[in-house]
Amino acid sequence: QVHLVESGGGLVPAGASLRLSCQASGFIFNKYAMAWFRQAPGKERELVTAIAWSGTNTYYIDSVKGRFTVSRDNAMNMVYLQMNSLKPEDAAVYYCAAREFAPSAHAYEYDYWGQGTQVTVSS
């Protein structure tokens, strides 16, 4: 069975930091690109960041550049998202996703998804 399990969300004030974790199992982790998406109420799911299978290539949307950092540990089947200087507009459910071989900006192209973890940022 394939599982992606996110953790680390919470309720924090603007300017605070959170570190999200995603534990993967049931597939060949180092053959998959990984990504973090987020979805706020009333909005479409959007890509936040993606990381290639090797961890050597990363992508960030403009709104999080300089504040968020994605990383992965293939030996432990883990993906992380360090979020600093959080803003109210960052509030959303954050999802971990996996796509074989290469990352994509399109949610529908991903193969596996976690259940999501809630991030709430007060102003």
Image (tube, rainbow, N blue to C red):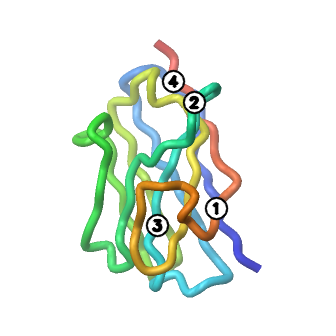
Q: Does the CB distance between marks 1 and 4 fall below 8 Å?
A: no
**Which dot, 4 or 3, sits closer to the camera?**
3
**Front residue of 109 and 6:** 109
Rendered location of residue 53, percent (x, y): 39, 78
Residue 54, picture quadrant = bottom left
Residue in the image at 51% along x and 70% along y? 78
Q: Position of residue 20 (x, y in %)?
A: 51, 50
Q: Which numbered disc, 1 or 4, marks the residue that appears first in the sequence?
A: 1
**Could you say which disc has been placed on residue 113 in the image?**
1
Q: Secondary structure at mark 3?
A: strand
Which numbered circle lies on residue 34?
Answer: 3
Between disc 4 and disc 2, the foreground one is 2
* Residue assigned mark 2: 43
Q: Which residue is mark 4?
A: 121
Comparing 103 with 77, the one in front is 103
**Distance from Cα at disc 2 to Cα at disc 3:** 22 Å
